[in-house]
Amino acid sequence: MTSVIVTGGSRGLGLSVASRLTAEGYRVIAIARNENDGLTRAMEQARPGSLNFVPFDLSDVRKIPELVKQLVKCYGPIHGLVNNAALGSHGALALMSNAQIEELIRLNTVSPIILTKYVVRHMMATGGGRIVNVASITAIKGYRGLSVYSATKASLLGFTHSLAREVGRMGVNVNAVAPGFMDTDMTQDLNGEHREKIVQRSALLRFPRVEDVADAIEFLLGPKAANITGTVLTVDAGVTA
């Protein structure tokens, strides 16, 4: 069974990606701090052994090498890595504490880079693999109150382009997806006027679904994307068109 690591796999987009991949026959290793009801239900509904939870705090970057070593030992060669885990904290830069800024950069930028470093070593040794970094349209288009978050997501785009050139000759494809505002509980809770303003910015006059982003990630992990690398697939219903 082909193994794929999905970070932040216990809820939201990460859980949707994990469920989508298990439905397509992958064995998913969902990494998150804690298990929750949604992940438990997904594991119960998935084929036995196809969705696995590994508790780990990705902000503890010193322990990442040992984590990867244990994952390879337990699950064998890793075909795919989806760097999805991230903090979505927002706030004006002038008012954010240094500790909060450092926390965002550690989890959103440093952690996925170090995790990728150790996973990609195994991919190169075993003949190839796929890496998908989850960025955001905030890396492309500015939004008030998201300067630090946007900086972390923009860093993943540069990381994607350059790493694709570093490891392409060893059979590793590296791509990114850049979701826009998605139709989730968070956007459902927006007041009607604010939600409508966001919708009106999009070419398709709607929010993309979480499942749409999961489909894009599944495509980049699969055989039809064999010759796609170093690209950013934007899924935003045309907000950045």
Image: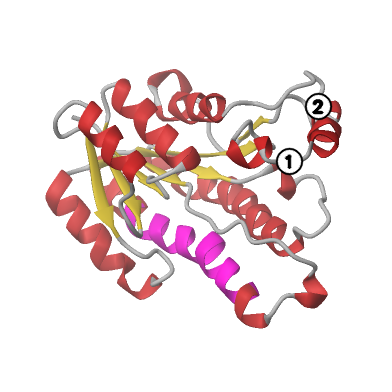
Classify residue 16 as left or right of residue 97. Answer: left
Quarter of the picture holding the C terminus? top right
Is any part of residue 25 visible from this angle? yes
Residue named by callout 1 = 190
Query: Which segment did they paint magenta?
Result: 101-119
Classify residue 183 as left or right of residue 225. Answer: right
Asked which secondary structure carries label 2, the reply is: loop
Name the amino acid, label 2.
Answer: Ser
| Rendered location of residue 214, percent (x, y) | 49, 29
Q: Residue at x 66, y 35 (%)?
A: 188
| Rendered location of residue 224, percent (x, y) | 44, 18
Magenta stretch contains residue 148: no
- Is residue 97 or residue 69 the one in the foreground? 97
Mark sitting earlier along the chain (1/2): 1
- Is residue 143 or residue 10 the one in the foreground? 10
In the displayed structure, 214 sits above or below 15; it is above
How many angstroms separate mark 1 from mark 2 (CA)? 17 Å
Quarter of the picture holding the N terminus? top left
Q: Nearer the viewer, mark 1 or mark 2?
A: 1
Classify residue 195 as left or right of residue 50. Answer: right
| Render colour scheme | secondary structure
| Rendered location of residue 28, percent (x, y) | 28, 37
| Rendered location of residue 137, percent (x, y) | 71, 42
Q: Residue at x 21, y 43 (%)?
A: 77
Classify residue 86 as left or right of residue 53. Answer: right
Name the amino acid, label 1.
Answer: Leu
Is any part of residue 3 visible from this angle? no
Q: Residue at x 78, y 39 (%)?
A: 191
